[in-house]
Image (spheres, rainbow, N blue to C red):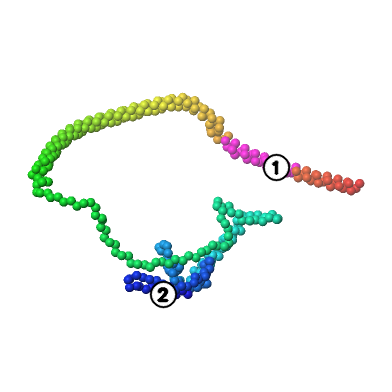
Amino acid sequence: MAFVSPTKRDQNGSYTFSSRPRPVEDRSKYREPPSEQTQSNYGNIMYDRRVVRGNTYAQQIIPTTALPDPVEVQRQQEIRRRTVATKRAREQCRTRTPEALQGRKHIDVQTDLYLEELSDVIVASDIECQTDAFLDKPATPLFIPAKSGKDVETQIEEGELFDFDREVQALLEVLVGKTVEQSLEEVMEEEELAGLRAQQRAFRELRNNELEEVLRLKEQERRSSKEKERRIAQQKEVLRKEREVAEKIAARAFTQQYLADLLPAVFTSLRSHGYFYDPVEKDIETNFFPWLMAEVNNSLEKRYTARALLDTIIDDVAWKRQEAFKDTQ
């Protein structure tokens, strides 16, 4: 265990740090599981796990003395188990190199662009450093630029450099002239604007007159086109009525010509189809003849039945006599 002496302050206000010499601890190459890690007191803050390095945003710092959560440990073990199973499944599904022939063996060959020596021994070196003592920064002195050049003095009497009455005369002439010129320009501009307004007023009146004339011509054109369309519609209606009258006259003439020979033909066709008949003749054809034919059919059926029965009896008798004659022989 390392022994660290407390920090001391000198009389001058500087901090000093000292520690007792100690051997370097034998640490393993790989990180040990949490259950096997030993609690050690670090003498150098560069190796202290409690010091946060890098980005500290949204970083959760867990104290070294806190006990691991069983649920979190179980979840980590489950994730590790799934990772191992996934890797094993990928290795099984991956296409393997075929087995070497008899008398040969496979060797590992580097296919990278730059060759690298492979070795099982990891080269490691230990480096130590000691920070210097921290001193208070002195106050920054006030910056004073270095003096350059030569100092020269002179004496100026009153009225040697500037005479107000004489020097202001030119300035007043310029101001008055500029004011008069600006006034004249403003007057000319107002006159020009008045002329432009009068010209615009005359142009508006002319444009309004032209617009009224255009509107009058458009209205006249619209009325004439509407009258033209109405006349065309009337003419089309007259032509349609004349066409209908002509068609009716032609249809009436065709009907009269067709009906002249139609009535005799119709009466002849109706008479031939039996629509004009004698009642006695119709009664005989519809009532007497069907009854007569039915009675005749019944009589003939009875006669045919009697003849068939007689033929059957005769056949039976002839067959029996034939059998008896065969027996007597």
For residue 284, side relative to residue 206 (left or right): right
Dot 1 or dot 2, earlier in sequence: 2
- Residue 2 position in % (x across, y down): 46, 74
Residue 58 vertical placement versus 250 (above, below): below
- Whether residue 183 is visible to the viewer of this picture, yes or no, is no
Can you say whether 33 is above or below 165 in the image? below
> Residue 36: percent from the left, percent from the top?
52, 72
- Element on which disc 2 rests: loop
Instruction: Tell me what residue is drawn at x 38 percent, y 68 percent.
Output: 133
Task: Give left or right: position of 250 versus 183.
Answer: right
Give the tally of numbered discs.
2
- Residue 284 location (% of width, % of height): 59, 36
State whether the magenta stretch is mostly helix, strand or loop: helix
Question: In the drawing, does residue 140 fall left or right of residue 305?
Answer: left
Task: Residue type at mark 1: give it.
Answer: Glu
Which residue is disc 2 drawn over?
5
Does residue 62 show up magenta in the picture?
Answer: no
**Residue 17 in view here:** yes
Using the image, tell me which numbered label, if any, was put on residue 301: 1
Location of residue 109 with respect to 27 vertically, above or below: above
Question: What residue range appears in magenta?
Answer: 282-307
Q: Nearer the viewer, mark 1 or mark 2?
A: 2
For this rendering, which residue is in front, 67 or 53? 53
Please check the rendered image and state whether residue 286 is part of the magenta-colored stretch, yes or no. yes
Q: Residues within 10 Å of mark 1 (few under 14, many from 20)?
A: few
Q: Quadrant of residue 9?
A: bottom left
